Image (tube, rainbow, N blue to C red):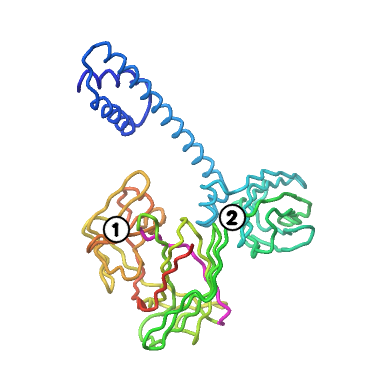
């Protein structure tokens, strides 16, 4: 190490900064120094002082940025929206688009805190926290908009082991004004009647994209898949879809009709979207039962700020056993497992092999050799704790598929896991969604 570099490092040796950040800043300063030639020792000293000043300013900026980032991370981790909300609400917390309400009411020896609120043209979400001596079992509440009751419901019944924090969702909210006056009134908590009332207002996120008859795909067999309507707000994308697929008789297993949705990130990665489906078609989601046309409402939680999506229908056929109770029918799927290590193979109908595993502080990337026509990937499971790590995103790298998971601990009890199933994908019916 040259004397000049040692001088700089000695000036800041008492400053606690991650070494990679420190080295990067030092190297940047040295690059500046090497672009100049100094013939006199006095000039060198003046230059050293100038570089040191710039360097210390850079260190200060770095420390401030790290402090602010840490504060934002801590704030997000304390948010009920972030802890319990869907992917879209979590992103709204990260982007600072959630209103901190922090309103408290104490009645009947029960304290209710209204924590946060979020409103756009698709949904209103409100988080709350209840402090009481008993376990929380159910809540009866009512929402008022401009003095009129718009929602009256009882929730959280039947379980006393659930946490005492939760989120109310209200839909639709397109008719709400830009800055509505709202009132939320809790009428009953468990069997205790009281008055826990909160008056507040929220500013609506106005971003809205709507389109009808967006796209339709048909194949030579007369099968079709269409996106009939799209409504997109910052936190959610709502789709109306129609699916018509020809169904062969199921000879072995239990078949269901599904769709796959991925969002395309700016870096080209495909992010597995969180979404829910509902249908007015009777028994539309029954195994081995398929209506002529399945019309659905699909709600995609916008975990990333992408406007590009790929959506495709498919059949999945599970191997397993059916069991019946007095009130319902259930299924136990056959499982396939493998060690979580390089070279391990999941012996599916189409085998999946681990060719490499990489981990850092935040995530684990597993490189598979597999057929990635459909983005259905193994789950990583800790057999001791029963904690599961699901795939977040993926990209194709030649013959391999790099799949990103949350950080997976290095333990002997970690395994790969999938249900024994086969998949029939309809690539000719895939629809690419590109919004403004």
Local secondary structure at mark 2: loop
- Image coordinates of residue 10 in percent, x first then y, are 30, 18
Residue 231, by quadrant, is bottom right
Membership of 270 in magenta stretch: yes
- Image coordinates of residue 88 in percent, x first then y, are 52, 56
Q: Which residues are magenta?
A: 269-282
| Relative side of 170 to 433, left or right | right
Q: Classify mark 2: residues with Cα within 10 Å, few (<14), some (14-19) or many (20+).
A: few
Q: Determine which residue is flagged by label 2.
A: 162
Q: Residue at x 39, y 28 (%)?
A: 58
Nearest to the eye among marks 2 and 1: give it. 1
Local secondary structure at mark 1: strand
Q: Is residue 117 above or below residue 424?
A: above
Q: Nearer the viewer, residue 291 or 32?
A: 32
Membership of 305 in magenta stretch: no
Q: Earlier in the sequence, mark 2 or mark 1?
A: 2
Q: Classify mark 1: residues with Cα within 10 Å, few (<14), some (14-19) or many (20+).
A: many
Residue 62: mark in rendering: none
Q: Residue at x 65, y 50 (%)?
A: 128
- Image coordinates of residue 363 in percent, x first then y, are 36, 49
Q: Determine which residue is flagged by label 1.
A: 402
- Image coordinates of residue 417 in percent, x first then y, are 34, 63
């Amino acid at each position: 190490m040259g004397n000049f570099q040692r001088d700089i490092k000695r000036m800041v040796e008492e400053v606690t900064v991650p070494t990679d950040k420190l080295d990067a800043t030092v190297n940047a300063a040295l690059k500046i120094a090497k672009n100049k030639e100094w013939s006199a020792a006095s000039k060198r000293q003046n230059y050293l002082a100038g570089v040191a000043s710039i360097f210390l300013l850079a260190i200060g900026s770095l420390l401030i940025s790290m402090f602010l980032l840490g504060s934002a991370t801590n704030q997000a981790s304390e948010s009920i929206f972030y802890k319990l909300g869907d992917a879209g609400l979590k992103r709204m917390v990260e982007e600072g688009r959630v209103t901190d309400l922090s309103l408290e009411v104490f009645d009947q020896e029960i304290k209710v805190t209204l924590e946060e609120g979020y409103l756009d043209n698709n949904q209103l979400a409100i988080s709350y926290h209840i402090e009481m001596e008993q376990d929380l079992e159910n809540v009866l509440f009512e929402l008022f908009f401009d003095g009129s009751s718009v929602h009256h419901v009882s929730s959280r019944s039947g379980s006393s082991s659930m946490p005492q924090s939760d989120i109310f969702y209200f839909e639709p909210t397109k008719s709400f004004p830009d800055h509505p006056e709202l009132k939320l009134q809790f009428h009953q908590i468990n069997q205790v009647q009281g008055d826990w009332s909160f008056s507040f207002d929220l500013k609506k996120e106005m971003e809205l994209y709507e389109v009808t008859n967006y796209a339709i795909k048909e194949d030579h067999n007369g099968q079709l898949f269409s996106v009939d309507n799209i409504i997109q707000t910052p936190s959610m994308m709502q789709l109306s879809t129609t699916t018509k697929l020809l169904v062969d008789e199921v000879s072995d297993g239990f078949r269901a009709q599904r769709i796959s949705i991925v969002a395309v990130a700016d870096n080209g990665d495909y992010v597995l979207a969180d979404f829910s489906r509902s249908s007015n078609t009777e028994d539309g989601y029954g195994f081995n039962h398929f209506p002529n046309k399945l019309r659905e409402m699909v709600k995609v939680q916008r975990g990333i700020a992408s406007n590009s999506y790929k959506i495709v229908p498919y059949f999945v056929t599970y191997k397993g056993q059916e069991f019946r109770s007095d009130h319902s029918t259930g299924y136990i799927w056959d499982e396939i497992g493998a060690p979580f290590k390089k070279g391990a193979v999941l012996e599916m109908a189409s085998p999946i092999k681990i060719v490499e595993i990489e981990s850092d502080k935040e995530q684990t990337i597993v490189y598979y050799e597999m057929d990635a026509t459909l983005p259905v990937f193994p789950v990583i499971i800790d057999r001791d704790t029963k904690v599961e790590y699901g795939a977040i995103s993926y990209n194709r790298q030649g013959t391999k598929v790099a799949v990103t998971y949350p950080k997976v601990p290095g333990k002997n009890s970690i395994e790969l896991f999938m249900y024994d199933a086969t998949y029939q994908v309809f690539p000719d019916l895939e629809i690419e969604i590109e919004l403004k």
